[in-house]
Image (tube, rainbow, N blue to C red):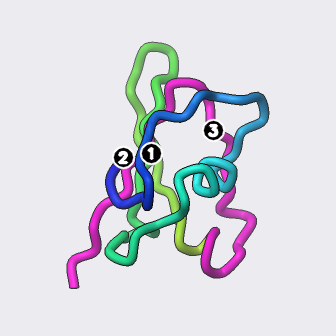
């Protein structure tokens, strides 16, 4: 949700990664703060939040920022404050 070019619910596919997801939603908008994105995931009944560096992954090609996506994950991409 947020500043993806085409934010939407995506059906999970096996071995899905953050890069796969970003390709599906068309990347980031020009107003996105991709390096302040969050991954919300439920683990053992607890909601956990992880930091994501989507801009580093997409713009800089930093493959170390590519994480696995699991069913039920929510990616939140905030707007940058200029």
Circle 2 residues within 10 Å: few <14, some 14–19, many ≥20: some
40 over 78 or under it: above or below: above
Residues at badges 3 and 1 in contact (C-beta under 8 Å)? yes
Q: Read off the residue under disc 1.
A: 75
Rendering coords of residue 60 (x, y %)? 65, 81
**What numbered label is drawn on residue 36?**
none
| Mark closer to the observer (1, 2) | 2
The residue range painted magenta reads 57-82
Q: Read off the residue under disc 3.
A: 69
Q: Secondary structure at mark 2?
A: loop
Q: Read off the residue under disc 2.
A: 1
Residue 40: image quadrant is: top left
Separation of residues labelled 3 and 2 (CA atoms): 15 Å
**Name of the residue lying farthest toward the left:** 81
Q: How many marks?
A: 3
Between 53 and 6, the one nearer to me in the picture: 6
**Name of the residue lying farthest toward the bottom:** 82
Residue 64: image quadrant is: bottom right
49 vs 66, left or right, is left
Rendering coords of residue 3 (x, y %)? 35, 60
Rendering coords of residue 66 (x, y %)? 68, 57
Quadrant in which the C terminus appears: bottom left
Residue under the point 46% across and 34% down: 9
Residue under the point 47% across and 31% down: 41
Q: Secondary structure at mark 1?
A: strand
Residue under the point 36% across and 70% down: 32
Q: Is residue 61 magenta?
A: yes
Q: Earlier in the sequence, mark 1 or mark 2?
A: 2
Rendering coords of residue 81 (x, y %)? 21, 77
**Magenta stretch: helix, strand or loop mostly:** loop
Circle 3 residues within 10 Å: few <14, some 14–19, many ≥20: many
């Amino acid at each position: 949700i947020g500043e993806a070019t085409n934010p939407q619910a995506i059906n999970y596919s096996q071995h899905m990664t953050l890069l796969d997801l970003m390709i599906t939603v068309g990347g980031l908008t020009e107003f996105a703060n991709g390096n302040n994105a969050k991954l919300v995931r439920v683990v053992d009944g607890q909601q956990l939040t992880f930091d994501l560096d989507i801009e580093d992954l997409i713009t800089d090609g930093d493959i170390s920022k590519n994480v696995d996506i699991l069913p039920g994950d929510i990616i939140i991409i905030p707007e940058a404050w200029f």
